[in-house]
Image (cartoon, helix red, strand yellow):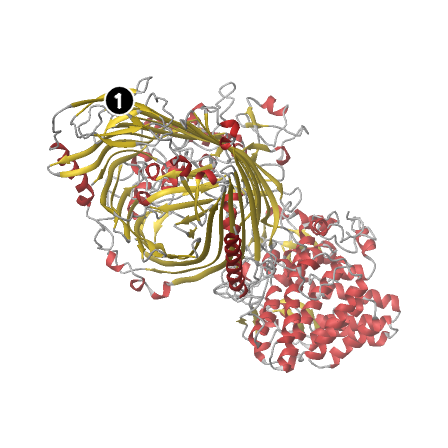
Amino acid sequence: MRSILRKGRGELSVVPRYLIRLPLFLIAVLLVFSLPSHAQQTTVTGTVTDPDGETIPGVNILESGTDNGTVTDLDGVYSLTTASPEAILVFSFVGFESQEIPLEGRTTLDVILGEDTQSLDEVVVVGYGIQRKSDVTGSISAIKSEEISRLPTPNVTQSLQGRVSGVQVTSGSGAPGSGTTIRIRGVGTLNNANPLFVVDGMLLDDIDFINPNDVESIEVLKDASATAIYGSRGANGVIIVTTKQGTFDKEMTINVDAYTGVQNVANRIDLVNARQFAQLANELNQNVGIEPDYDVNEFGEGTDWQDLIFHSAPISNVNIGAQGGSANTNYNFSVNYFNQAGVVKESEFERLTVRLNNQYQASDAVNFGHNLSFIYFKRQDEPSGIVGTAYRTYPTFDPRNEDGSYIDTSPVGNPAAQLEYNINNDHNSYRAVGNFFGEVNFLENFTFRSNLGFDYAFLDNKSFTPEYYVSPTQQNVNNSINVSNNRTQNWLWENTVNYEQEWDRHRLTLLGGYTSQNFYYEELSGERLSLPGEDPALWYLNAGEETSQTNNNLARDWSMTSILFRVNYTFNEKYLLTATYRRDGSSRFGSERRYGDFPSIALGWRLIEEGFMQDQNTVSNLKIRGSYGVIGNDKIDEYEGIPIVTGNENAVFGANESLIYGATITELANPFIQWEETVTSNIGFEFGLLEERLTGELDYYYRRTNDILVEVPIPAYVGSANNPVINAASVENTGLDLSLNWRDQKGNFGYNVGIVGSTVNNKVLDLGRGEEAIIGGAVGISNLFGSRTIVGESIGHYYGYKTLGVFQNQSQIDNSPTRGPEEPGDLIFQDTDGNGTVNSNDRVILGSPIPDYIFGFNVGFNFRGIDLRADFNGTYGNEIYNAKRQVRFNTYNFETVFLDRWTGEGTSDSEPRVTNGGHNYEVSDRFIEDGSYLRLRNIQLGYSFSNLAINNFEFSNLRLCLSGTNVFTLTDYSGYTPEIGGGNLLGTGYDNSVYPIARTFNIGVTANF
Amino acid sequence: MKTLIKNSFWALIFSTSVGMLMLSCAEDYLEKSPKAVLTQDSFFQTAEHAEQAVNAIYSHLRSFNVHVFSYIGVTDIASDDAEKGSVPGDAAFLEDINNFTHDANNTASAGIWGGYYQGVFRANQVIENVPNIDMDASLRDRLLGEARFLRAYFYFFLVRTYGDVPIIERPLNPEEYQQTRNPTEEVYNFIIADLEFAMDNLPSKSEYDAEDLGRATSGAAQGFLAKVNLFQDDYQGAYDNAVAVINSNEYALYPDYLGIFRQEGEHSSESLFEVSAVALEQGGGGHQFNQVQGIRGDPNNGWGFNSPSDDLEAAYEEGDPRKDATIIYNGETLPSGEVVEADPNMGADAKFNRKAHLPQMPSIGFQNSGANIRILRYADILLIAAEAANELGNPDVALDYLNLVRERARQGNPEILPNVTVTNQNELRTAIWHERRVELAMEQQRYFDLVRQGRAQEVFSELGITWVPGKHEVFPLPQSEIDISGGTLEQNPGYN
């Protein structure tokens, strides 16, 4: 591997490679020297009861700092031999508070366990605050830090995959440093359906920069009660990230997390070998009436170009964190370094993240602090489109001639040459994201908080293409340098006042606030040709020819200002009310629609507190909640409401015919443009059974989005060259979100099982243009489009011909409806309207990229320090458009399915004769495959040592683990991966040779000091 | 409890007042405008903006839907002067027009509608906004004159193509998008008002600086006025305006008939109005008017549409040099020495429009023609004067103007094209109409003339084409326009 650490512009790497491995090495060395120490043993016995004196069977008792433990019997009695009479025993049982009791020489110890009220006091992060989980009326799912840092990925959003109900996470690419597509509860727009991200109160469009080890929790807000406080930005759902904080009055703890592993492409696409290719290519020639090109006998296996572009690639990560605090200062400090090479050669990513979170208690009434993160990353991308090139290049070619030069592999470019010539691209990002805050408590119940969030990002890209020649279609005549810089400045100032009061059976929280945000983006780029050499020292614009220069500079900005209110009221711990209101003003909205109002209301009823629930032990929690609210999607172009002047509308005047500059407004804008508005209703149940061993939530939602932006034709006599975008379309999403968790402990053996599942039913109600469809998903040949959006169906479903087999002979063609002219061996398309001929009116719906079900489940066990955990996830009922198979501008390599082609009567009724383009390459179900899958997302086996002392060096915890990610995928899809994301919502789910998602095996260590 | 209420009250007052205060001063804060471009708000502030906006109207005259493909369709191909041309099946919608089998989904009729109304939109922006600019008054009046001249030009084409059309006199607000068609009479009145304004406010051709050559002139406005009058059968108006143009001494017949259409004839003494173009290496000043009509085959100059008809060929008098100046025959030798070999699919007797022929390939290619598109020339004015004089009962005056045109056509050869001497009004009318046809052949005049002259049915029936009176005088409005209007626009008769 050519590492970006070693090459490039002579820069030093951020972290030397040996340093990454150092912590691993140290820990390994320390382990070798670790020896358990023995002392005097003692046996202790006793009975465990609840506060009412009832004995409790099954209570877990553990000698603290060891894996020595037992459980109480049916009478609540236990007996345990401890290492020393001074041992500390830990008593724990589901639904009760744990107790740690020092033996202090006793041999009899009876214990009363108090009922656990902690679970009631568990808190959840909500917009602009935290709430007791029991008081929550909205649909919010949370995942905690240990789930987030489990996967070997730099992107925290991947940890949501299969973990949170109602959330679909798709990695559109396996390229190092690439992001994900997140859809919360379906697709409620035709435009941008990405959720809003909130990191420590800063509102952002992405969280790709976050170090997973820094995250304390991620909350996904799904219904209106939860998201309406974010007003015009809440409609696609909100994901709140809270980073780890220090603790006052706590000694410093240091933790080290490190892993290293190897990634591979789990499966290859089955392509034909050289001999088979020669035969198929000859047959193709024969089918179009030209001479064969190949002597089949000359060829053997040939080249599988996939072998050439894929490799095993290392991945590693080191995180060092320190946490603690004095009486009035606390801190959380971390440094993270991540390095990943891609499974496609020449793609690499490394990232350094530093975080410093501090909080200062200035007085009883005043505290302030900050959460600061600084991120540097460097990325190199693989040669553009190389996965597709390797798929298409003929296996009959070798990569190189005998003299070492690259072979002309026309009509497809030589992937080996691409790997040499098209790799000099560097993307460097420098980013600072964080917030400063201050809080003042006054008049007992009031808290004023002012929060200034910021995101400053600078991205610097450079690419150099050398002069080279492989073939007439794969060459670069002049070397070139392209440099671009862009920067983002985004700040948010929020001021809130919170009022909390509890009296009698009432609990009331009021929140009011004012916020404003400002965003600015600018890019500057330039290009020059003909540098005097290829030395990286020359990779600057000034080295190129001045006359060849081009440049580009543009910017965009937006601003928002909002007021917000929320009331939370709980009566008698039974009846819950949440009402929110936000008013957003945004520069993006047209001058006639500057402000939008977004209210919500929600009610909850905790049945578990009712009298009739008190005389039973089966149900430990039961809550019903319902919400209704209006939220918006503000992700529209910044200046959609402002007509702009088109320049270079030049006239020609004068005796010498000069071009005279002209400019005018040629296109209209819509001053009434506004947010897209979503109305959401949600009904949810939360329950806990068997003393919270089984917990679950079930939600039903109905989301209707109105005012979706769409181009609606206006009369041509208005004179505009465009159809302005207006708020006209409507879409609904309905579905169920379910999550279930079973958790139990039997002595030393603990286990848990979790299931999440969601259904999505997506339907377009109105497009503002009657029955006329919107077409999307260009497949790259002859203006063919595979996707359609039309009233009454789901967004962007696949639409084309249904195949009924293959024509076996001419008489069958003569007696069948045809498109004309078909030949024997061509696909039979269904004559849907039965009019005796096949034309575009016969196309039918062939599938949808939106899954019917999204699911995930996990199982975990732990026993005496050993833990095993497996996560599965998948989708069901979605289709994938295998576009790479359809695009054949020329003869390309064949998948092995072509070996089953029709070659004469009776040979095949599914795979047509070999052709390039034409009838068999119309949009049809030939290219649409089932995208359902079940994947073992991650499996991890760990072993923890407690209170381990090695040569006077004490670990409070040390865990080693082996982990496999994307271990296997069960799917019928023929491509590298069934996770196909990205693209426009009107044409999504197209596999145009996606970068494969890797299978990774790694070893890791976590140490706390 | 009391404290609670009190505290709640203060909390509410505090946050509400802070919020309201902040929001009230937020108006400016929420004003953001696109970067690196002018916007509606920042445009139309200076004299330069006014000039640029006017230039942009002229620029639109070179666009595809104004003076290129659909344009030759509804003018020449529709008429008896030309066949569709090109190869069978290519641009079938033009063949439909040639045969009068077109319907409301015809591409040409939709193209003209959109293209000319986009021109109106550009003109309207100037007419609406320039009066508010603080600038030199005489320049402002001239620019407004140019915009109104061009608006009149667009509407004159629209009214002849579609009959009743909506009069859009300023940029519309969204709530005004639903419009109805105004009667032809009102549209003509609107056109006349614009042309009269232009006539009063524009300089004459000689008054312009050399660098402004190509801008609309008072002469052009008056010339169009004469033509508009003629199309309304207002012979007195047509006569008065045409004669005023003639007597202005701004214009004269260009001696070499073919030369009018060559580089040398751009903005010649004969030109009242033409669309200036230039073929530059960087592009941006050209158009495709010549390309779509260029020789298809060898030399490969274009697409070969708008092919002169046999009927036109037969219409020329014996020896009329204008025939050869109008028609390129398959197999003939061009002045460059090249022999024309038409695409075999066009047939052995393929013909091309010589008036649109480019003797040399422009920079970049034929899609970047720098030839000016001739719109109104002096011979047309003379023939309008002649036709109007004859209708007004002045055959002698009519003959004078008519014979001026024939004299130039003769190119000094006394053996051909003798002076017309008939004074019988009907015979003279026929002679003038004949002269209009051959003088202005393939110059996008003929179809409108045939309709105006009320003899389209007669002419087409002789050619075996069914031309339906009460329907084919005008083209259909685009079907999409009818659909979008939701019932406020009515289709032309016979096209539903």
* Residue at 57% from the left image edge and 57% from the top image edge: A595
Left or right, A267 with reference to A785: left
Left or right, A48 with reference to B177: left
Callout 1 amino acid: Gly
Percent across and percent down for residue A882 are 46, 34
The answer to which of A1004 and A815 lies nearer the viewer is A1004
Q: Does residue A413 appear anywhere in the picture?
A: yes
Residue A79 occupies quadrant = top left
Q: Does residue B413 appear anywhere in the picture?
A: no
Percent across and percent down for residue A955 are 19, 37
SS label for mark 1: strand
The answer to which of A587 and B346 lies nearer the viewer is A587
Percent across and percent down for residue B73 are 68, 55
Percent across and percent down for residue A145 are 34, 40
Category of crowding for the residue at label 1, using alpha-carbon neighbours closer than 10 angstroms: few (below 14), some (14–19), many (at least 20): some
Image vertical order of residue A169 relative to residue A354, above or below: above
Q: Chain of mark 1?
A: A
* Residue at 75% from the left image edge and 59% from the top image edge: B165
The answer to which of A126 and B130 lies nearer the viewer is A126
* Residue at 77% from the left image edge and 55% from the top image edge: B474
Q: How many marks?
A: 1
Residue indicated by mark 1:
A46
Left or right, A641 with reference to A758: right
